[in-house]
Image (cartoon, rainbow, N blue to C red):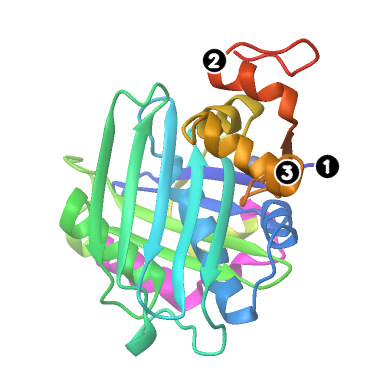
Amino acid sequence: MKTDRLRRFTLEHQGIRGSLVRIPETWRCIQERGVYAPAVGRILGHAVVAAALIGKNLKFDGRLTLQLQGSGPLHLLVVQCTHDLGIRGLARCRETQMVEFGGRVQPGRMTVTVESGAKQERYQSIIPVEQGSLAECLGAYYQDSVQIPTAFWLDVDDQNASGLMLQRLPGNPAGSSGDWDLVIEQASKTLPASLAGQTDEAVLTRVFDGRLLRVFKPQDVAFQCSCSDDGMRQMLRLLGVDELHDIIAEQGRIEVRCEFCNHGYTIAENEIPGLVHGVPDSGATTLH
Ligand SMILES: [Zn+2]
């Protein structure tokens, strides 16, 4: 049975829409592919949940990338979510003891990038990280860059990853800012603690007690890596034929490992001419 899903809903009379996401299996797949100290895993897990919540809002086929970069111990974190909710992510640390989101060792900036499927369109926002949590940082991003009041609650441990996003619908006559404030206040009393261990309906009923909800069909979320033989060959082609022969001379073959999913790709010496000229040797994997 599929456990990982995202459920959209609206609060009919308040002009608010939202998404609830619970993705334990996706989160387990990401944890299996990297070794993360608890503090690092927590930030990565929050980013994975947030990427699912934000990625659902993509207006076209494409991909959203959420990236944190800083000079502190956690120097890079990348999570990507496609329009059909395929997610991958990783974090790189210099030292795991001191990692925390806020405070003096915080990541320096957050980048949100949206690419269309053909990569013909690309939008990027760079946001300084000044808040104590990723949820607050994302709230500030929506307020300042997108200008839509938005709130996030993210909840992660080594078994579970779940979250909820609320967004005030722009230009909707229903609902006032008073309604928004009230809903946020009420949700904050029970979230994120009430996200775990219940059905979607039970969670939403509990959080929005007494309010008229319209709940949409759930959508599957899954771990998915976009790496490919073709992509790896394109990347190697950039090194040039001399460099590729040098690697073969040193190591006997060329081995590349995808950092997101740990999948290994191997190139033998007799494949180099085909690789460099973009045509497959007999026996080599077909290029598309
Ligand atoms: Zn991969």
Image marks 1 and 3: residues in contact by CB distance under 8 Å: no
- Which residues make up the magenta segment? 179-201
Q: Quadrant of the C terminus?
A: top right
Position of 146 relative to 163 (above/below):
above
Residue 184: x percent and y percent? 34, 67
| Circle 1: residue type | Met
User: Is residue 136 magenta-colored?
Assistant: no
Residue 62 makes an appearance in the image: yes
Q: Is mark 3 within 8 Å of ligand 1?
A: yes
**Residue named by callout 1:** 1
Q: Quadrant of the N terminus?
A: top right
Instruction: Compute the Cα span from label 2 to label 1.
Output: 45 Å
**Residue named by callout 3:** 263
Position of 96 relative to 27 (above/below):
below
Residue drawn at (54%, 29%) of the image: 241
Query: Does dot 2 land on a helix, a strand or a loop?
Result: helix
Residue drawn at (72%, 29%) of the image: 269
Image marks 2 and 1: residues in contact by CB distance under 8 Å: no
